[in-house]
Image (spheres, rainbow, N blue to C red):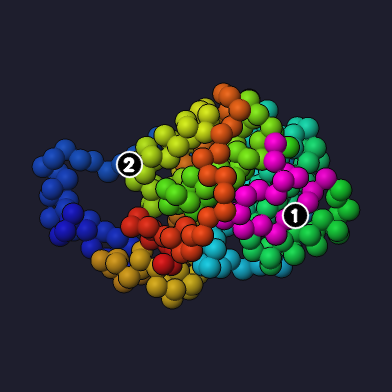
């Protein structure tokens, strides 16, 4: 594409040569055929779910800022409601025990506000996030929500193994990192017919990586039932994106300004256990930054 696109102010534009290439190759301007009402997610929160948003927004005030130390990038609160809507539609919300590995998104707060889950357990490495969620739990008087200070390099605490119907996680996007996260989640599941939800991007995970991950999922006795392309969008915005030295900035062919919209997206997966889930990693691992960073990583630090 060299010579076919150029920077014009804050935009990337097609050059004269690019337009000529498109004309001679029969390439026309794309016209979106995706649903504008639901932003192509297939869900639109309404009724009781939509009604929790004002309180959700109020409770979220003062939440910790994201940190590159743990490869954090949170989704908007409205996107959490989309996630909850989809989980509800698949029958994975009401009267379920839900295990959340990593919750800088504070999805647990939104789930608790629905009043439909039997139990919600968060295991999270960032103690700032845990302190915040515990504050909300105390304020609301929730007795079915709990938070553990937890490093995914360690096995799941004994008292949490085999206790949950559903897992939800947004794993780091290295092959071994995803294998580790899914293995820990498998440890928490009760058994056959339990399900899980997670996101994988195209930005930092090519199809070859997807294939390796899918093979690992099958070895864990998890089958993919649903794939929602670009369902999740993340608030990787502000000056920190251009100041931290991420590869997406340092290797860009154009000078980049701080993004002001949720540009990073991931595909939302649902998996279901066809047999007893079988974690591929059960012991403690000693990985450091390689847990977060590989040759495909563009918005995490080595």
Q: Residue at x 61, y 54 (%)?
A: 154
Query: Mark 1 near mark 2, Cβ–Cβ under 8 Å?
Result: no
Q: Point out which mark residue 208 bears.
A: 2
The alpha-carbon separation of the residues under discs 1 and 2 comes to 35 Å
Q: Can residue 57 be seen by looking at this rendering?
A: no
Residue 10 percent location from the top left of the image: 35, 67
Q: Nearer the viewer, residue 259 or 181?
A: 181
The residue sitting at the bottom extreme is 243
Residue 70 percent location from the top left of the image: 54, 63
Dot 1 falls on a residue whose secondary structure is strand
Q: Residue at x 43, y 60 (%)?
A: 290
Q: Is residue 57 above or below residue 31?
A: below
Residue under pointer 1: 147
Q: Is residue 108 magenta?
A: no
Q: Nearer the viewer, residue 5 or 116?
A: 116
Q: Nearer the viewer, residue 275 or 18?
A: 275
Q: Which residues are magenta?
A: 144-162
Residue 39 percent location from the top left of the image: 51, 41
Position of 43 with respect to 8 (left or right) is right
Local crowd size for mark 2, using a 10 Å CA cut-off: few (<14), some (14–19), many (≥20)? few
**Earlier sequence position, callout 1 versus callout 2:** 1
């Amino acid at each position: 594409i060299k010579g076919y696109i150029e920077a014009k102010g804050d935009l990337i534009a097609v050059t004269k040569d690019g337009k000529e290439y498109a004309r001679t190759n029969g390439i026309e301007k794309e016209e979106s055929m995706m649903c504008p009402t639901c932003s192509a997610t297939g869900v639109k929160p309404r009724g009781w779910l939509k009604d929790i948003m004002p309180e959700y927004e109020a409770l979220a005030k003062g939440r910790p800022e994201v940190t590159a130390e743990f490869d954090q990038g949170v989704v908007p609160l409205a996107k959490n409601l989309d996630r909850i809507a989809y989980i509800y539609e698949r029958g994975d919300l009401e009267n379920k025990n839900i295990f959340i590995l990593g919750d800088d998104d504070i999805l647990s707060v939104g789930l608790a506000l629905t009043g439909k889950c039997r139990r919600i357990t968060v295991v999270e490495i960032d103690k700032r996030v845990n302190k915040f969620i515990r504050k909300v739990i105390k304020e609301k008087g929730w007795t079915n929500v709990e938070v553990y200070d937890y490093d995914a390099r360690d096995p799941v605490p004994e008292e949490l193994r085999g206790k949950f119907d559903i897992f939800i996680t947004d794993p780091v996007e290295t092959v071994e990192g995803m294998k580790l996260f899914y293995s820990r989640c498998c440890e928490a599941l009760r058994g056959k017919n339990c399900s899980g939800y997670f996101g994988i991007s195209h930005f930092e995970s090519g199809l070859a990586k997807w294939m390796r991950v899918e093979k690992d999922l099958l070895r864990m006795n998890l089958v993919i039932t649903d794939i929602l392309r670009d369902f999740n969008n993340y608030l990787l915005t502000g000056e920190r994106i251009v100041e931290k030295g991420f590869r997406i900035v340092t290797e860009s062919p154009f000078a980049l300004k701080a993004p002001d919209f949720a540009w990073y997206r991931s595909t939302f997966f649902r998996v279901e256990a066809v047999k007893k889930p079988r974690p591929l990693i059960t012991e403690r691992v000693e990985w450091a930054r390689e847990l977060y960073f590989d040759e495909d990583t563009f918005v995490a630090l080595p």
